[in-house]
Image (spheres, helix red, strand yellow):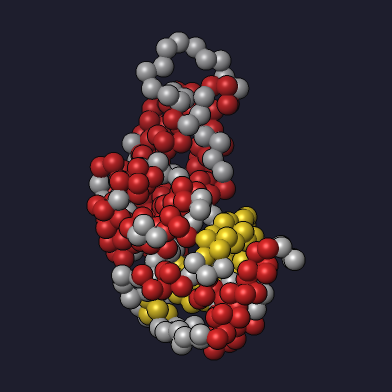
Amino acid sequence: MRGGAGSVDGMDNRSEASEFLSSRRAKLTPEDVGLPDVGQRRVPGLRRGEVAALAGVSIEYYSKLERGALAGVSASILDAIARALRLDDAERSHLFNLAQAADGTSELLRPRRRAKTWMPRPSLTWVLDAITGGPALIRNGRMDLLATNPLGRAMHESLYERATGPVPNFARYTFLDDDSRRFYPDWDTAADTAVAILRTEAGRDPHDRLMHDLVGELATRSEEFRRRWSSHDVRLHGAGTKRFHHTAVGELELAYESVDMVSDPGLSLTVYAAEPASRTAHALALLGSLAASTTVAEPQVRKA
């Protein structure tokens, strides 16, 4: 991907780094960082010289970095740039990932996977099935839905039914299927989150050809995706609340916790829960009973 949509190709790392740094600089005002607002500004945001001063480097050096030349930059300089640009944890990690990709260390640091397919261990299946009070799922950084517990399968029934590839994919469903606007009442938030997760993964693993193909497909077919991809926003796994609309039980407002799976690098586990005795809790109980009466065997081999 090139141009406004950006790139996930490792060979275009300079463009990725340049667009990321300039987009973060454009989000800041002098007031944000305690500087006087002096003179006319041709474009929004801080000037390069202001960022350089805040980071304690020369304007020539910072300009070189913002042109995408991150290879060999020390961790202390990256930290200084992150502080100057007021990067959050996700953005700081993304900057370091881009720097690692620039000097080739991302290939060395990336965990090796022994196979192109991922099969949940029996013990992991038992753990998922033991989570009975709420939906639980496992996905990768490309947002492929790899495994669920029975309630998670029931909650995401529409993704399974409407999947166009070998596995359901949250990003593809969000941007290419109008049904997603029914499933996600807060569609804009869901879309922003999906793109930020993909952008984060692209920085972490810039040589993932499946990711490259997915972003290319979405950018070609969805203007909503292209616009968000060009913003260079990133996101780490976390916690919060989400709203869903299920065709069988209606509105669901669920808290969630997401964690990286140490035993399966690159995968994450998300568990949803409803507030006890709430309407959503009763709806989940109904969904669970409906799922138990119409159990469908789940395919267990997934692309990781």
Q: Is residue 207 above or below residue 226?
A: below
Circle count: 0
Would you say 141 lies left or right of 239 here? left
Residue 262, position as x, y percentages in the image = 56, 71
Q: Is residue 272 above or below residue 118?
A: above
Q: Is residue 92 visible?
A: yes
- Displayed quadrant of residue 47: top left
Residue 212, position as x, y percentages in the image = 30, 59
Residue at image coords 62%, 59%: 253
Residue 291, position as x, y percentages in the image = 55, 81
Residue at image coords 25%, 46%: 2
Residue 20, position as x, y percentages in the image = 40, 41
**Which quadrant would the C terminus be assigned to in this image?**
bottom left
- Displayed quadrant of residue 170: bottom left
Between 92 and 139, the one nearer to me in the picture: 139
Q: Is residue 14 visible?
A: no
